[in-house]
Image (tube, grey):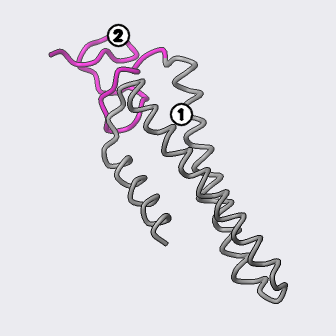
Amino acid sequence: QGSPVSPGGHEGSDDDESTSGSKNRVVSGASSAFLTTKATHGLLNIAAWAVILPLGIMAARYFKHLDPTWFYAHLSLQMTGLGLAIAGVLTGISLENEFGLEVDKHKLLGFVALGLACAQ
């Protein structure tokens, strides 16, 4: 089986700008659907892991003097963050299935992080 065609159109080149370290079918002329799904995956996970979930942690840590408001804020933020994280994982699975990405380590990290978040 031949190597994927690089953006320059030459077989065997590994200098494509697609996902680092992965062989995939989306090499040149990435489709609008691919870019939209990839951006959605990234934005959902950034919103969940870098914004909403840390805000939920801060609500529990710094606002306990506002009882019981801190708890409802914490619960609401954590559930929202978990929902966004699940949506992010689902868009990642969609990227893999629809566009043939091979991102095994990235996928494992996502599943482990989501599993730990759910277990907690």
Residue annotated with mark 2: 9
Task: Name the disc covering residue 38, or none.
Answer: 1
Label count reads 2
Is 105 in front, or is 28?
Answer: 105
Q: Residue furthest top?
A: 9
Q: Which residue type carries mark 2?
A: Gly
Q: Residue furthest left?
A: 1
- Within 10 Å of disc 1 (Cα), the crowding (few <14, some 14-19, many 20+) is some
Residue 12 falls within the magenta-colored stretch: yes
> Which element carries disc 1, helix, strand or loop?
helix
Q: Is residue 4 left or right of residue 63?
A: left
Which one is in front in this view, the residue at disc 1 or the one at disc 2? 1
Location of residue 17 with respect to 55 vertically, above or below = above
Corner quadrant of residue 111? bottom left
Is 46 in front, or is 6?
Answer: 46
Corner quadrant of residue 3? top left
Look at the image and give the residue range highlighted in magenta.
Answer: 1-29
Is 51 in front, or is 10?
Answer: 51
Residue 69 falls within the magenta-colored stretch: no
Q: Residue at x 28, y 21 (%)?
A: 13
Label 1 vs 2, first from the N-terminus: 2
Location of residue 31 with respect to 68 vertically, above or below = above
